[in-house]
Amino acid sequence: MGFTKAVKQGVEAAKNEIVVLLNNDVAPDKDFLKPLEEDFQDEKVFAVSLNEPQFSWAKAEWKNGFVEHKSGPKTENTHISLWANGGSGAFRKDLWLKLGGMDEIYKPFYWEDIDLSYRAWKRGYKVIWEPRSIVHHQHESTISSHFSKDYINFISQRNQLLFIWKNITTFKMLFENKINVGKRLFTQPKYWWPYLAALVKIFFIFPRWLKERHEQKITDRQILTKFL
């Protein structure tokens, strides 16, 4: 079914208020759930990303017309995060359902957890990273055994475009993306493949974009500047 659809079914079947997602290549430390009880006392917290020691809280910047993401510097305290990892994160179920969960337009994998968390941010909720909840994640151990590196890179590039076209509602930023997509197509011929793969979904993207523009409470710039 792919990651997104399987996870959506699992969350919908869950009976409790908070749902923890752990991939099959994740091993949690003992008592990793305890700090989450404190974190979710804040009703504005939609999701909590668990602490994978090789990473930290997630940040992003708007660079040359694209959303570029990476891990922020390590800290001993909880920290806001652009997104909660779909393979090792805790989510408030009622808000998950209100947001519609992870979007299957990204299937088979990548960017769906960033998309979900970003939509929560735009509606005035927040996502945090919890350093006390430690898990050990062997990233891409499942994906890499089923898909080639070229295909994984293709999907990642396609979904980066889908994320931008779906969620960025600031017209100036969209214009910057259009200009820089053109530059990539001119200088990187292989980029045509992820671009065309994203373009064929544009009619599915547009109503989603309209929904984001209508329901947003804070702007793209306001979100991204939180992580500078």
Image (spheres, rainbow, N blue to C red):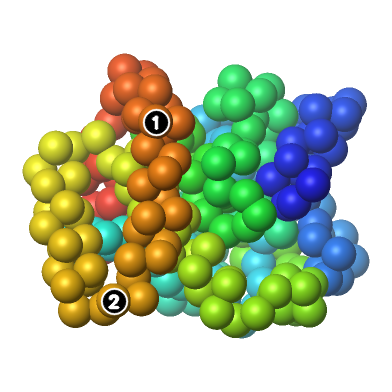
Mark 1 is surrounded, within 10 Å at the Cα level, by few (under 14), some (14 to 19) or many (20 or more) other residues, namely few
Disc 1 versus disc 2: distance between alpha carbons?
A: 24 Å
Q: As drawn, is 210 to the left or to the right of 4?
A: left
Q: Quadrant of the C terminus?
A: bottom left
**Side (left or right) of 98 relative to 120:** right
- The earlier-in-sequence mark between 1 and 2 is 2
Residue at horizontal 52 percent and vertical 54 percent from the top? 111
Residue 13: quarter of image: top right
Query: Amino acid type of disc 2?
Result: Pro
| Residue at image point 53% right, 63% down | 155
Asked whether the viewer can see residue 216, the reply is no
Q: Which residue is mark 2?
A: 189
Amino acid tagged 1 = Phe
SS assignment at label 1: helix
Residue 188 locus on image (x, y percent): 26, 78
In this view, the residue in front, 125 or 8, is: 8
Residue 132 - label: none
Q: What residue sits right under mark 1 in the picture?
A: 203
Res. 76 image quadrant: bottom right
